[in-house]
Amino acid sequence: MSGSSNEYNLLLPLIPVLLLVPALYISGMESYDAAFLIVLAPFIAFPTIIIAGQLYNGNETWKNKMKEGGIIGLGALLVSLSVSVWILIEYLAEIHHFSGHQVTSWIEWISFEVLQSDYTMSSTRVFGVGVWIDSVTLMLLFVATFLCFLICWFSLGYMNTDPINEDRNHRFYAEFVLFAMGMFGMVLADNFLWLFIFWEIMGLCSYLLIGFYFWKESAAYAAKKAFLTTRVGDVFLMVGLLILYDIYGSLEFSVIFADPSLHGAVNSDKLFWALLMMFVGAIGKSAQFPLHVWLPDAMEGPTPVSALIHAATMVNAGLYLVARMVPFVDVGHHGVAGLEDLGLIVAYIGGITAFMAASIAFVQNDIKKVLAYSTMSQLAYIFTGLGSALWFYNHGEHHAATFVFGASMFHLFNHAMAKGMLFMASGSVIHEVHHAHDHLHEEGNEHDDFDPQDMRNMGGLASKMPVTSTAMMIGSMSIIGVPLIGGFWSKEGIIAETWLAALEHEPLMIGPAILILLTAGMTGFYMSRMWFMTFAGEPKHDVVNHVHESTPWIKEPLVILAVISALGGFLLALFGVIDYLSGEYDHLALHKPSLLEAIVYELEHAFLPKNPNLRIVGWTTILLSFIIGPIFAARVHGGKLAEGHRASPMVAWLTSLSGMFGSQDATELSQSSLSEALQNRLYFDYYYELALSKTVLPFAVFAAWFDKTVIDGIVKKVASYSVLGSFQIRRVTTGRASDYILMLTVGTLSIFALAWGVSG
Amino acid sequence: MIDPSWIAALGVILFGIGLLGTFYHKNAIVVLMCIELMLNAANLNFVAAASHYGDVDGWVFTAIAISIAAAEVAIGLAILLSLYSTQGTISLDGARELRN
Amino acid sequence: MVNFESVIFVIVSGAAIVGALGCVFSSRVAHSLLWLMFTFFAVAAAFLMASAEMLAAIQILVYLGSVMLVVQFGVMLTRRRIQDVESLPTLNAISVVSSVGIFAFILVLLRGMMEHSMWDSDPSTAPTTLGFADAIFNDWTMATVILGSLLAMAMIGASYLVRDERLVNLLWDMGAEE
Amino acid sequence: MALPHILPEVLSKQISGVTRNICMGVALALLAISTWAAATSLGDINWMDINFGGYELENTPFEIIPQIGVSWHVGADALSLPMIWLTALVVPLSMLVEWDAKKGQYFHPLLLVMEGAMIGVFISLDLFVFYVFWEMTLIPMFFLILVWGGEERRYAAMKFFIYTFTASVVMLIGILVMYFNTGASISERSFDMIAMLDSGRQMSEGLRHLVWVLLLIGFATKMPSVPVHTWLPDAHVQAPTAGSMILAGVMLKMGAYGFLRVAVTAFPTSTVVFTPLLVVLGMASLVYGAWVCMGQTNLKRMVAYSSVSHMGLIFLGIATMQPLGIAGALFMMFAHGIISPLLFAVAGAFKHHYHTLEIGSMRGIAHHSPWLAGHMMLGWMASLGLPMMAGFVAEIAIMIAFWMTFGWLVLLPALTLVITAVYYLTSMQRTIFESNDPHHGVLPDTLHHEPRDITWHENAGMTILGVLTVLFGILPFFFWDMMSYWSTEFMVQLLSEAMQSEGVRP
């Protein structure tokens, strides 16, 4: 492999970038004033990479030194990361108290007046651009910048060593940086319009990135599908914004959130429709139930793209938007009452998607598809959490609402970290298997149908890829919600609160509550199934024997994220992140007198909640997700490593454990009609295609025909008739002199009569 | 002295007959003659007016009209003869060149 | 009692109308030519009755003398076969209808003219030939001179139109003795 | 100070090289002058405080045909200046793109004549002169299509000319009726636009509506709205690249400009009464245009129909009777004027290099001409209405205004945005991507030589347009403030009392 140890000295040019933030700090600049740098850096990097790439395509230094633009991208993302970390430190470490949000507006985009109903002209209104930072933004900003940086780091290794996209990587990095700009801009935007603008830019970049291997028919098709489905969502979001604008006369957060209910003047069902439309936009972007068809296909893009789009950033956009809806429904702080069913709808959509995605993930054999569906179901989790939060807010249960809102946001954090790492780990697995495959078949152009992503070919990789397997293990544990590891702290909160809502307040909430409970179990199964199929048992294909971990740049992000997923959950929970995210506290700190007491409180809160039925719920989730699911998966796919293969201690214990539960042949189950249906994604795609091809295309062809024949036909008819008419007239000139004389006399006499009549 | 209005009436009738003649005949010469007839009718009117108003100009006009009519006949016949030499016939239906 | 003069006028106008009808409706060109000459005599008589003796003289001299002669020549030169009936009328639907229409119109014109107010005022004395002669040479001198040149031109033009360039004629013109 | 209006009538017959440079020189000079006019006028003549009806850069009108009151009265205001600048921009760019046109010594002067005529239309404040220039633009376009056009160019040129000519004759009738109402006797009648405005008020109600409809027919045909749009696809498919760039870029805007300048200004009440008609026309051309677009196979014809669809938005913008809507319509005219030449330059380059415009016949062109593919993507995305591009600004403005006036009806244009996305993506998909072979695309069978990427001058033209689209997408306020101020004044002085008189609540 080309990876030499001194690859990392390529990072030397990035050192000065690190000095930028301290320099700004010394120059006395406020942290939130520097926020525009986060968006500006990638925005400048985008054209530089494209132009440099186009000009220096193929020359050596560009390829090796600059990694075809990768280093420039990394630098830009480093700037954004450093500035966001700077803001984070200032806000978390109590240096700055912001009264909930900080607004600085940069430029006025377009200004105009509006004719009011009393025919007078309103004052000039402005669509400006500005920065809005509060706790949710901070968390999302950190997640986005941190993960973008790591994924860009990862793609230096993943993309540049792949021979197929030899001179095309500059396009990848340019689109990657543009995407990052879109995400950062969306998170920082201080009004809904600019949120929408960056939202659509992310849509464009997801189209470009998914369609990176544009010569592949399936990739181009997947890109188009992704863009169109998100576009449908965006259109509804736009309509929602229009309604909002009509209600509040402005889209600025500061104006709207100051008093969402306009002293009770706003009519609730118009606001309900606005929020519902925006929720449809969120569904489109975060691939929830009706508009989820594009996410599995989006795996056509290179793995860093899937990691970026389907773990870290884009899918969180939908959640961020729903999070932004909280002030509307927060009855406590002059929110608008009567919007309960919005929360219900959100929860139900979440529940359905979670259950559906988890069930489909059961039968997926492609490692990235499994992760895609797990993203969909985990996002659905957070949607359910937000749904119940909205419901609680609107119901006045302030404490429960803030808790579940904080928990879902925290779960978003954990999920992003874990899922980003899982995608990168799967990327490294695919990469290594692919390389091994190329090595084995040097003459390798007889395209045997070996698919590097198919888990059925893998197995027993634990011994060959120690770092990836441990990282994958920790990531899966965090997603499953194994106690004390990462996701457990937040997932358990969501389930408890939803059940609380279902049992005590709203019988209707029981639906999503049951669904997410089952999904918890199913997550346990398919995540561990994935891990066992790839890492435990004997290799199922000879190629797999030659796999070894050697590409540079890949291992570092895995290690960092593995650490964060493992410990991050517990530590942050200790520091009261849930309450911080929901705005209860101003900053992260030990709100308990001593560390030990805080730990006891957290543990007791997680495992022995005061409310008895919550305790039952809590324990059933742990039972389902941690014990039943993995055991069942181990029985089907588990198995000890082949002799002579040693894995790292933790992984070795797990693989040996997986072998102990005996094995059960699930072949007849996998042929059943249910799994057949699940294979075809419950035929959603089939029905959507059918609906489209039956209505849209024939109607378009008819319209084209109609236009050509009917409207054009009329014009042609007019022309042909006039020609016919001229022939008739021509026949009058007979050529006989006598007729001419006749006409002559008739003419003169008639003129004479006319004159005579007039004069007479 | 006869009442001039009657002479004018005669003129009009002669004019009418001459006019009809031009439609009826295929033979160019007869058409020419009918035109001569119409010209004469016109002269009658002139004379009627002259005698009615006692103004001599009427007669001058008639004299001029007569001489012009003479010139016109000469040229008409000349054209007819050349038509005759090219077409071989002077019937009006024969001449179809006007029709493109 | 019917005064003598109007009786003569009726005869003269009757003759003129009969002549005109004869000229129009005769099937043989020669006959229509004769009828035309007869009509011209009647018209000259009408001039006389309107006490325009000079005009009557001119009419007879110019028209009957020269014009009819020329037309006579025309008829002779263009007739191939003696017996063919050239002047068959062109009877198609449109011309019949339109001619009847025109004739009706002329009658209306006639009636309109007769009642026209200009005839009410009493007819003044008819002009004398002396006055006529004086008018031609004093008031209308220019017109008469132009008239003369016009007639000359017409004659030259007519003769040019019917020239015959066959070689034999050219030689003959140049007096070649054959 | 009369806006320097050089009517490039001189048609030089020297070798095309020399003429080409001269024409380019003249066109660039015009661009410089209009940019200077726009910039400085922004400077000293602050557009912000001009009130409607007061024209900047106005010259003292001098009589041309005094008997019937025709005077050379010229002026530009916030409505016409963006259009003038657009013309001055598009013409040199189209010359640049068709730098190597055959028989160049006629081609470039013709473009200059068109530029002169079009600028004439935008600045003339005398309806007679306006109409003369309006007709004059047809002639060079006719010859452009006739001589340099595609296969059945004769049919297309003929259809184009006669179709638009009859429409403008209908408009002429309207203008004449207005003319005769300006004054009782011949002496005090005049074609001057200002005189026309109050003539519009004296007319009876019925007559006003009639004249308004006549003018609407004339302008709607020029700015193709649905029932009368069939001349556009034929003209575009056959027109040479430069020709269709100018046709789409500027000539379509003349229709909308004329409608606002003449019809709406003279008859505000009938505009208010006929707003539902405007909505129907706009919606029809927007939705119907998009649907037809999806069924197309020829690239240029598809882009032509997309122009029909985008111009439909302008009617919707005006029909909202909101200053935001009208400003959005104006900006849409401007933005579409920048984006559609880019689209046609790309389509023309396809024709020039791949000799085919059939969408299905070629795949994966991105391998062979990456620059062309890049420009195509930029252009397609811009006209798709993607944010950060000029198209989006106009669309969002019109949509917001549309919601304010028509509520849930906004769903129809909103969903059409999706359909627009569908046909743009499918066409781009099939031409640039999807070749199932990592290193070279499937070439159309009509092509026998290895296709080169686009030439430098095409590339330069497209890049400038692309940069401008993005520039006006991010910072639209250069022209936007001018337009929004004008439309506010327009609303206050004209439409609001018209609406009060008609009892229409905004």
Image (cartoon, helix red, strand yellow):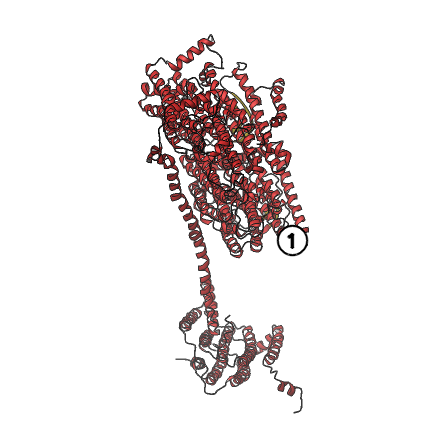
Residue at mark 1: chain? D
Which of the 4 quarters of the picture holds residue D41?
Answer: top right
- In the rendering, at what x and y percent does residue A750 appear? 45, 66
Q: Nearer the viewer, residue A421 or C174?
A: A421
- In the rendering, at what x and y percent does residue A406 appear? 43, 19
- In the rendering, at what x and y percent does residue C145 appear? 63, 75
Q: Nearer the viewer, residue A86 or D342?
A: A86
- In the rendering, at what x and y percent does residue D287 appear? 43, 42
Q: Nearer the viewer, residue A282 or A276?
A: A282
Q: Which residue occupies 37% across, 37% down?
A: A683
Residue picked out by circle 1? D11
B31 to the left or right of D92: left
Q: Is residue B46 above or below residue D498?
A: below
Q: Is residue D358 above or below residue A480?
A: below
A482 to the left or right of D9: left
Q: Is residue A722 above or below residue A231?
A: below
D465 to the left or right of C113: right
Q: How many numbered discs, if any?
A: 1
Q: Nearer the viewer, residue A402 or A749?
A: A402
**What amino acid type should be assigned to the residue bearing mark 1?**
Leu
The N terminus of chain D appears in which quarter of the rendering? top right
Seen as rendered, the residue at the extreme left is A507
Q: Which residue occupies 60% across, 40% down?
A: D463
Which of the 4 quarters of the picture holds residue A403?
Answer: top left
SS for tag 1? loop
Which of the 4 quarters of the picture holds residue B21?
Answer: bottom left
Q: How many other residues sit within 10 Å of disc 1, few (<14), some (14-19) or many (≥20)?
A: some
Seen as rendered, the residue at the extreme bottom is C178
Q: Is residue D44 visible?
A: no
The C terminus of chain D appears in which quarter of the rendering? top left
Seen as rendered, the residue at the extreme front is A644
